[in-house]
Image (cartoon, rainbow, N blue to C red):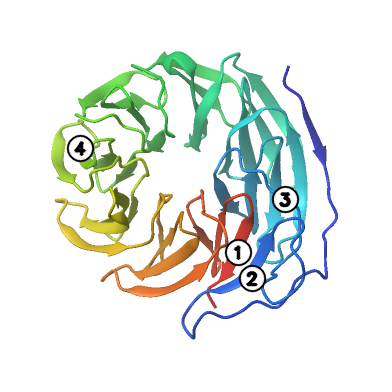
């Protein structure tokens, strides 16, 4: 049984403490959500604990949306105060934002909320375990058990179509210009018509695909568990190039900016790296060591690559050269990709961190 309730929490004003500036051009920690942190030199903010069941943050309209095991929360980006909180039983995927709406998946359904207030708008029960979800072009695309994929109309929750993939994907789909791209553990990338669900093409990869496809410049890029990055023509699925980057799986989606792909890679007994490649031909431009213990996907903004690390650090690299600009300890290994918005970087483990770039 799926239930939803919305409760509003007052802003815990007056709890902010002064942060410590790392270097003149470095990162300044601004806010930290975590119950029980004592005030002192290392304290940033005392707020509500976040149990991270779905390691995913999204920013929109001055808010950071984060999900835990039983609810989704909207947090004011500028202050760290909780704007609203909605209880979601069996939280499974999301949150995702499209326009003024927020979408969250449970184990057997999808709920739409007003992103500003948290008010429930609609609920569609799918009666199947939900694994992944994305939104785009007026639709919500959901991946479920046994390879099922659904498309819902975002404004109403009405079911538009249902399809079946070769196996259950383990990463989010991507949607661009009327096409849904899905990587599968069946060693393939599948492209579907976003309006009908009809298969447009399927490309084989020697490795299982656990990373979310990235689409740009007429190409689709995916990493596979054989340590290789593949590029396909977005319109036809024809292979363009492949590059072996690591001897461990590439399970994180690349970041694409300015015709360059930035990939989180790992080498057995050799550490973790961010590797930059030319998107058109896969030529490696640079590779920089960024800790150990597994990293989420990198993010790029304003010529800087931000990489959260399992070694309890946030790294900032020059996007053109890979030179280390700064780093700052996060006390715990991070599970989300950094979200960069309005001069701030947000990321989380079981805590929500915010760093000021100004």
Disc 4 element: strand
* Number of numbered callouts drawn: 4
Disc 4 target residue = 233
- Mark 4 against mark 2, which lies toward the viewer? 2
> Residue 49, image x and y in percent?
72, 50
Q: Nearer the viewer, residue 151 or 264?
A: 264
Q: Residue at x 17, y 51 (%)?
A: 280
| Distance Cα–Cα, label 2 vs label 1 | 6 Å
List x then y, in percent, for residue 350. Answer: 62, 49
Looking at the rendering, in which quadrant would you find the N terminus? top right
Asked whether residue 259 is in view, the answer is no
Q: Which label's residue is closer to the chain start, 3 or 4?
A: 3
Q: Earlier in the sequence, mark 4 or mark 2?
A: 2
- Which numbered disc flags the more N-terminal residue, 2 or 1? 2
Q: Which residue is mark 3?
A: 49
**Residue positioned 31% across, 27% down in the render:** 191
**CB atoms of marks 2 and 1 within 8 Å:** yes
- Secondary structure of residue under mark 2: strand
SS of the residue at dot 3?
Answer: loop
For label 1, the residue is 354
The residue labelled by disc 2 is 30
State how far apart marks 3 and 2 are (Cα). Answer: 17 Å
């Amino acid at each position: 049984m799926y239930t939803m309730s919305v409760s509003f929490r007052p802003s815990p004003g007056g709890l902010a403490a002064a942060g410590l500036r790392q270097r003149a051009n470095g990162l300044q920690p601004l806010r930290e959500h975590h119950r029980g942190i004592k005030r002192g030199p290392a304290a940033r903010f005392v707020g509500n604990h976040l149990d991270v069941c779905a390691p995913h943050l999204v920013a929109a309209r001055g808010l950071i949306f984060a999900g835990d095991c039983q609810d989704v929360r909207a947090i004011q980006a500028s202050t760290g105060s909780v704007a609203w909180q909605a209880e979601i039983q069996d939280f499974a995927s999301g949150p995702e934002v499209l326009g003024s709406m927020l979408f969250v998946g449970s184990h057997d359904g999808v709920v739409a909320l007003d992103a500003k207030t948290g008010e429930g708008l609609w609920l569609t029960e799918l009666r199947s375990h939900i694994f992944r979800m994305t939104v785009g072009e007026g639709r919500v695309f959901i991946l479920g058990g046994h390879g099922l994929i659904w498309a819902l109309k975002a404004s109403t929750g009405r079911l538009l179509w249902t399809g079946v993939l070769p196996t259950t994907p383990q990463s989010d789909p991507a949607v661009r210009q009327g096409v849904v791209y899905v990587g599968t553990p069946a060693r393939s990338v599948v492209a579907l018509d976003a309006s009908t669900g009809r298969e447009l093409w399927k490309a084989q990869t020697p490795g299982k695909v656990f990373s979310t496809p990235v689409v740009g410049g007429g190409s689709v890029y995916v990493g596979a568990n054989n340590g290789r990055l593949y590029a396909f023509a977005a319109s036809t699925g024809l292979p363009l190039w492949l590059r072996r980057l690591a001897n461990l799986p590439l399970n994180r989606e690349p970041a694409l900016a300015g015709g360059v792909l930035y990939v989180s890679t790992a080498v057995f007994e050799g550490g973790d790296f961010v590797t930059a490649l030319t998107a058109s031909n896969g030529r490696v431009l640079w590779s920089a060591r960024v800790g150990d213990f597994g990293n989420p996907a990198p993010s790029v903004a304003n010529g800087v690559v931000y990489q959260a690390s399992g070694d309890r650090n946030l790294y900032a690299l020059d996007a053109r050269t890979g030179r280390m600009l700064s780093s700052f300890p996060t006390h715990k290994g991070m599970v989300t990709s950094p979200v960069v918005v309005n001069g701030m970087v947000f990321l989380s483990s079981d805590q929500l961190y915010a760093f000021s770039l100004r």
